[in-house]
Amino acid sequence: MILVKAQPFDAWTPSFADLQKAMDEVSGTVERPPIPHRVMLPADYYLAEFPVTNEIYRQFVNETMHREPSGELVDLDRIKTGKGFSGVTTVSEGAVAAWSRNVFSANDQPVTGVNHTDAVAFCKWLSRKEGRIYRLPEVYEWEYACRAGTDTLFWWGDKSDVRYMNYAASRVGHPTPVGVYPPNPWGFYDMHGNVAESCEQIGRPGGAQKGGGWNYPGSLMGSDVYVDVRGTFTPHMPITRRTLEIGFRLACDVGEASPRPGDLSAPTVVAASGLGPDIPELEITVGERIELGSIRTGQAVIFFVTRSGTWILNDKRSTDQGKTWEQCDPIYETNCQLRDGTIIATRGANSVRFPDPLDGMGTFNLKVSTDDWNTVKNIKASLHIPFGKHFGPVKGLIEMDDGSLLMTMFGHNYGDQVREHNTMFPIADQAYKTRVILVRSMDRGQRWSYLSTIFNHPEMGREGANESTLAQLPNGDLFAAMRTGIHGFIDKLGRAELDEPLFAAWSRCSGKKWAEPERIYVNSRLITGIYPESVITEEGVLALLRMRPDGSVVFSPDGSGTVWTDEVTYYTAEEASIYQGGMNDIALIAPNKLMVATFMVSKDSVGSLRKMTTAFRGIGIPITVNKVLP
């Protein structure tokens, strides 16, 4: 137990004096300013360093015959943000015995599958056993200790971060032993993540939850987030419900906590490591620019490297790494080489329209080559998207281990009429926010059908979501990154520029369902941009290309896409008139060497790019990325 000296502070946990205001305050927005109200903590108190573990909870169960912890497995990682949380998925059929599963039963893991009633019963048992009064912390006591004198949503800053807590984006998938992650400045572990913690709120008996658990998305975490388990705002979470992400930690009044006979001289629960996950560092070297010759483009550079080492740049190919070129059939931006060497490609301009929403059938053109893009044939592929209105592919196309093909597309369903707040197109007829979906082919690209929706959160982006990339990560998860718009926006609470960044989402189940989208940060800097493209090096580093207002590549060293630590800018915003930042591309040219393909334009052609489609010079920027050995 750690002593906390009570002081008045500006609390962010809602006061619920105004219920509508409270709902705005905890609306689930990824970017939110805390809305303070003054709180006077009544007295000093003790709070436990860690959540209650399975080991000590087992003593309680054995001595009292209280029910063992159990609860439903719910998927809070795939919920819709915004007012009124919805779409919570129950993974299990009924309650699951927590201790029957290895990933929930270790002695040093926090107990889960306990509700507010169980936690209160444990406090009463331990109080009788030790001769002092243990209780659950009140929500403002919890928040005060959690913030530990800081003024940010998390004790390390305002952004959720896999280096400091176990939550959905950590991709752990279960509670970790207490104290795996670093403590806050006052010595409290696991205040963010691992398990959501039962608390009390004075004047509102029945329990509350703070902190967020191993399966919470970043949008539902932070010192201010509050879950009222009485059901006022969360009817899916009544007080009696038990789920496998809820635990608790102990509080004790100062007068009750003085040493008594039988107290131990040393704690029996110690931090597992306190260091968090081991994120490798990167050694990144940018090489000399490579001249790629003239290219025909009015907007996009498409660069593709085949498994045999052939470079394809728009409508020319090279078998000697760019020294000489020959004309070829134009490669399209949505492309993939299959395991047997076949290359398939299609283009975003092939927007498929579906005149009958119930039929949902359409066709698009697909290019196929079996000889390294020396000769190419065109086929007409079919596409089935129920209730689809029009969709088109951009970038994301991969082959799975079972031979199936997955492709991202963006567009509208019938009924998708959330208008873009876009000053560029104030009266455009079809200026509606788009969604990103995943389609699948089981016959090598001839027939495609809808599989899942990756991103349909109109409140999270000015344009909705559109241009997207798709990759299978080293751990088997799928990763998608998407553009959402870069025009700036101020919401009803005065929060500015919430809809600009790139977003990422993950799937653990081969694309059938997707995690809550997360904004991408390099350390604490928000990453905006368009036309993302992802590449994975042989060492498992994930690189993500993005453009506008400059051009850069950001890197996830552990290949998870959940933490980004490095960025290489290959042209600045000031150079944008020279390095035309339309649509660039990136590919692996060696096991741990990437190359960005961009293009330059002569100064006298600026302003007339559409007319001078042959005035562009292709430029390659090689980037070598190696993990640093510990």
Image (cartoon, rainbow, N blue to C red):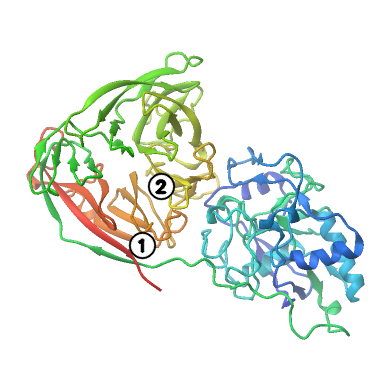
Q: Which residue is farthest front?
A: 340
In the rendered image, residue 66, in percent from the top left (x then y), is placed at 88, 57
Q: Quadrant of the N terminus?
A: bottom right
**Residue beneath disc 1:** 566
Which quadrant of the figure has residue 7? bottom right
- Disc on the earlier residue, 1 or 2: 2
**Of residues 563 and 431, which is closer to you in this image?**
563
Tag 1–tag 2 contact (CB < 8 Å)? no
Gap in angstroms between the C-alphas marked 1 and 2: 16 Å
Residue 450 x/y as whole percent? 47, 27
Mark 2, residue position: 502
Quadrant for the C terminus in the image:
bottom left
Residue 151 occupies quadrant: bottom right
Q: Given the image, on which type of amino acid does mark 1 rest?
A: Asp
Q: Position of residue 60 (x, y in %)?
A: 85, 65
Is residue 481 shown left or right of residue 595?
right
Q: Nearer the viewer, residue 549 or 557?
A: 557
Q: Can the viewer see residue 282 in this picture?
A: yes
Residue at point 14%, 40% (across, down): 317
Q: Please tell me whether residue 267 is drawn above or below residue 115 in the rendered image.
A: below
Q: Residues within 10 Å of mark 1 (few under 14, many from 20)?
A: some
